[in-house]
């Protein structure tokens, strides 16, 4: 019998495929199953159904789960990252991306540690943009985003700039529009191709809307794993 998690996962992956074909999208869309505060067994279940991309918010939790689970999982760090946790986070060999680079200083420190911890492989990073302009959210303002991207590309040889990410306000498609504008701005200032820049946006309540707005990386938690246990 299929469990709730495998059914939920199948429902979400199917809806993404359906949307892709109805919109004629021919680029890949990555589904990050957000497993924060969920037990390792829940992740294992999704893994046994073939899923490989998981997102975690807290460094200690990610490191602990990574040590208990198969090493072909592609972990995405999607929570706020403090400098004093960088070394610990980069000790995870199958860390696939950090989505929450929100300052030039953090990028510099990540670059230095990546050179030591994983000299043979560049570290994929997304720049987090605060599209909803909330003081409580991390991320840099859309107006200044090209500066940090330029810094990563020019000065951080151990980092691979993948794209930009936003959390945004729940239920507000405005954030998706602003992230797209940020992408265009980065491309025009730095002479990059638009298809070179990924957009990480969309969660359980709005991932379909995000895909309609060009998202290439959706982060879906509760729709797959159910309500989160309290911290
Ligand atoms: C928790 C979280 C998600 C997933 O949220 P759901 O609403 O459960 O899908 C996505 N992105 C970030 C950054 C999160 O912290």
Image (spheres, grey):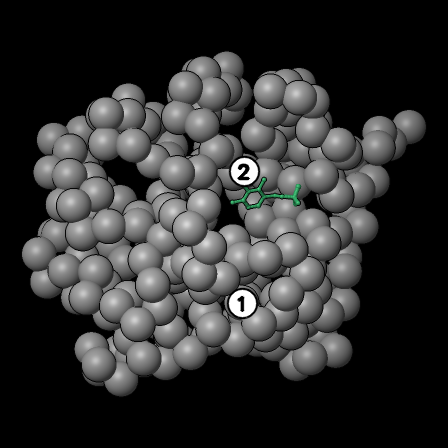
| Quarter of the image with the N terminus in it | top right
- The part of the image, by quadrant, that contains residue 231 is top right
In the rendered image, residue 155, in percent from the top left (x then y), is placed at: 8, 56
**Distance of mark 1 from mark 2, alpha carbons?**
23 Å
Q: Nearer the viewer, mark 1 or mark 2?
A: 1
Q: Is residue 73 visible?
A: no
Answer yes or no: do the residues labelled 1 and 2 have beta carbons within 8 Å?
Answer: no
Q: Secondary structure at mark 1?
A: helix
In the rendered structure, the answer to whether residue 42 lies left or right of residue 53 reads: right
Query: 70 or 166, which is in the foreground?
Result: 166
Q: Which residue is mark 2?
A: 54
In the rendered image, residue 163, in percent from the top left (x then y), is placed at: 37, 62
Q: Report the residue at 13% width, 52% height from top.
A: 156
Q: Which mark is residue 175?
A: 1
Q: Secondary structure at mark 2?
A: strand
> Looking at mark 1, is its residue's CB closer than 8 Å to ligand 1?
no
In the rendered structure, the answer to whether residue 28 lies left or right of residue 102 reads: right
Of the four image quadrants, the one with ligand 1 is: top right
Q: Report the residue at 69% width, 50% height from top.
A: 204
């Amino acid at each position: 019998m299929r469990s709730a998690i495998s059914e939920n996962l199948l429902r979400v992956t199917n809806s993404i495929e359906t949307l892709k074909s109805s919109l004629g999208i021919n680029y890949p869309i990555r589904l990050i199953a957000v497993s924060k505060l969920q037990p390792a067994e829940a992740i294992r279940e999704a893994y046994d159904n073939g899923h490989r991309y998981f997102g975690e918010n807290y460094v200690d939790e990610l490191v602990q789960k990574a040590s208990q689970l198969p090493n072909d999982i592609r972990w995405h760090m999607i929570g706020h990252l403090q400098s004093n946790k960088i070394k610990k986070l980069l000790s995870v060999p199958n860390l696939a991306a950090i989505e929450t680079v929100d300052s030039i200083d953090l990028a510099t420190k990540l670059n230095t540690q990546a050179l030591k911890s994983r000299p043979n492989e560049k570290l994929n990073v997304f720049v987090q943009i605060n599209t909803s302009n909330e003081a409580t959210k991390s991320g840099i303002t859309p107006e200044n985003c090209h500066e940090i991207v330029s810094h990563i590309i020019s000065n951080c040889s151990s980092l691979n700039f993948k794209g930009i990410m936003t959390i945004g306000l729940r239920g507000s498609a405005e954030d998706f529009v602003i992230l797209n504008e940020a992408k265009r701005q980065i491309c025009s200032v730095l002479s990059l191709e638009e298809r070179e820049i990924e957009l990480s946006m969309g969660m359980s309540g709005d991932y379909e809307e995000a895909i309609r707005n060009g998202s290439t990386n959706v982060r879906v938690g509760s729709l797959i794993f159910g309500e989160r246990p309290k911290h």
